[in-house]
Image (cartoon, rainbow, N blue to C red):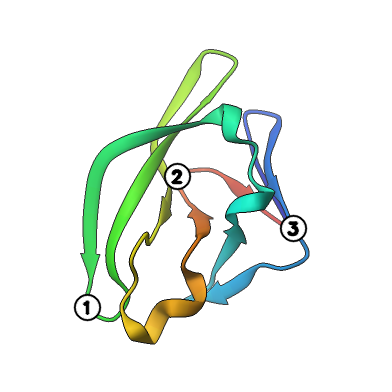
Amino acid sequence: MKATWNNQVLAESNDTIVIENNHYFPASSIKKDFFQASSKHTACPWKGEASYYTLEVDGQKNEDAAWYYPNPKDAAQEIKGYIAFWKGVKVE
């Protein structure tokens, strides 16, 4: 699987985990240069609190376009350390 945005590969892995139709990429597969920590947080009843990254490619920002669960609830422990994408990031 490959995650791309603004003609740049953000992450690539054969070991994604699919939950609720989202591919979660291992943290080791992302290109960290494009990721900036965000202050946004949301809550999922069964996965826990999500944190976000803003993506920046060639001077363009995609606010809060990647998310992860730093301390997922027991039911979602398998995605600890994994990152998923939305907001126009193509995953294929």
Q: Residues within 10 Å of mark 2 (few under 14, many from 20)?
A: few
Residue furthest to the right in view is 14
Quadrant containing the C terminus is: bottom right
Q: Position of residue 89 (x, y in %)?
A: 56, 44
Q: Which residue is mark 1?
A: 45
Label 1 Cα neighbours within 10 Å, binned few <14 / some 14-19 / many ≥20: few
Q: What's the distance in space between the residues labelled 2 and 3, CA to CA? A: 20 Å
Give the SS element for disc 1. loop
Badge 2 element: loop
First in sequence: mark 3 vs mark 1: 3
Q: Residue 67 appears at what percent x and percent y?
A: 41, 52
Q: Which of the marked residues, 2 or 3, is nearer the chain's N terminus?
A: 3
Q: Amino acid at mark 3?
A: Ser
Q: Dot 3 corresponds to which residue?
A: 13
In space, the residues marked 3 and 1 are separated at their CA atoms by 28 Å
Task: Say if 74 sits above or below 90 in the image.
Answer: below
Q: Is residue 8 left or right of residue 59?
A: right
| Identity of the residue furthest to the bottom in this view | 75
Query: Gap between marks 1 and 2, in whole Å?
Result: 22 Å
Q: Residue at x 70, y 29 (%)?
A: 7
Secondary structure under tag 3 reads: loop
Q: Nearer the viewer, residue 45 or 81?
A: 81
Between 70 and 38, the residue placed more toward the observer is 70
Task: Name the mark on residue 87.
Answer: 2
Q: Which residue type carries mark 1?
A: Pro
Q: Work out which quarter of the rendered image holds the N terminus and state it.
A: bottom right
Residue, x 52% and y 13% (percent of image)?
59
Q: Amino acid at mark 2?
A: Lys
